[in-house]
Image (tube, rainbow, N blue to C red):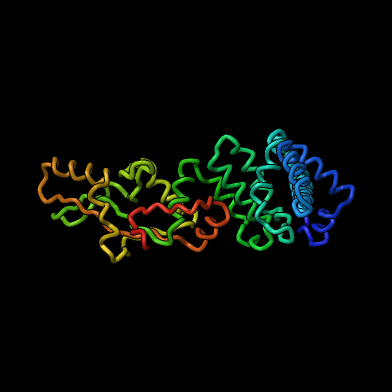
Amino acid sequence: MLSPMTGSEIAAAAAVGKAAAAASKKALDEDPSEKAMLREIGRETPAAKRAAEAHMERVAIRQELRLKLWTPLVKILGIRSDYFTDQFPQEISDRVEHIPDEALVSPRPSLVLPAMQGLAYSLDEPELKEMYLNLLATASDGRRQDDAHPSFAEIIKQLSPAEASLLAIVLAWPQLPIIAVRRAFSDPEGYETMQSHVLDWTDRATGAPKEEPLAAMYVDNWIRLGLIRASYSQFLTNDAHYAWVESRPEVLRAKAEIESDPRPGITLDTAKGMVTRTSFGERFGAAALPTSGDRPNLGLAEDE
């Protein structure tokens, strides 16, 4: 069983000893340009030389992390050894680079084993691969390790690549406006849902409304997974948050369909609702989703 990487282990990895020196040399040999750069700045000034030496020690720590945490797991799982040998060490190292050396820990087996298995089956699906790598990096940070819940790897397994990108947008907001498009009847009084869970999806390049044909199914899936809640008995009180409704393709299509219906007493009803990010969903987003800083509006004003 893997145990957390202690401060003494990290210090030992950074020390100028045979194991660390060999690990550092191996890591630097993997990137000749970095090696040349370090040698060059080492010639400039004593301060630059010390900086280069400190960087080499940090590389040794990263290499030690690779060897300690991941190599045994690859053998146990028997998965895509070419990727996990050649690419994975660098990709995970890039994601833990910001973590202070003293905070690096071994991810808990209850999370890392299913996450590595999921990653192995998602190498051709960049959106899911990115989520697994982010999750593993979070689990390697002792300051945030509890944010990486063991169930998160299973959550990723139940997402498609297309909905993973949309989920990142939705979980960027605590609340979002949503509507259901309904055909309302006056006699007898009632309604029929024509389109559920309509959000203000837009084309990222043009800002024009864009349909996501499977979005309603995705929203139901996110509700099932406990990441969000959707309610049509609650809604945002500022009507400006629903200003996008009339221009939605789903609404325009439903309006045309109702106008061509010969039956009397049928009208279009766009029921206002609200999507709320759960605490579980917020934690999942922080642990596994990319943080680009870009929060598309999806019906909300910039100052919300």
- Count the labels in the image: 0
* Residue 172 percent location from the top left of the image: 45, 56
Q: Is residue 61 visible?
A: no
Residue 38 position in % (x across, y down): 75, 44
Q: Residue visible at 70% across and 56% down? A: 108
> In the orientation shown, which residue stands out farthest toward the right?
18
Q: Quadrant of the C terminus?
A: bottom left
**As drawn, is 233 to the left or to the right of 54?**
left
Residue at horizontal 64 percent and vertical 49 percent from the top: 95
Name the residue at the front extreme.
44
Instruction: Give the x, y percent position of residue 105.
Output: 73, 57
* Nearest to the observer: residue 71 or residue 292: 292
**Residue 287 makes an appearance in the image:** yes
Q: Is residue 249 left or right of residue 58?
A: left
Residue drawn at 72 percent across, 41 percent down = 37
Query: Residue 187 appears at what percent x and percent y?
Result: 13, 54
Query: Relative to 159, is 146 above or below?
Result: below
Query: Image quarter for residue 208?
Result: top left
Looking at the image, which residue is at 82% across and 44% down?
23
Q: Nearer the viewer, residue 296 or 186?
A: 296
Q: In the shown orientation, is residue 231 left or right of residue 10?
A: left
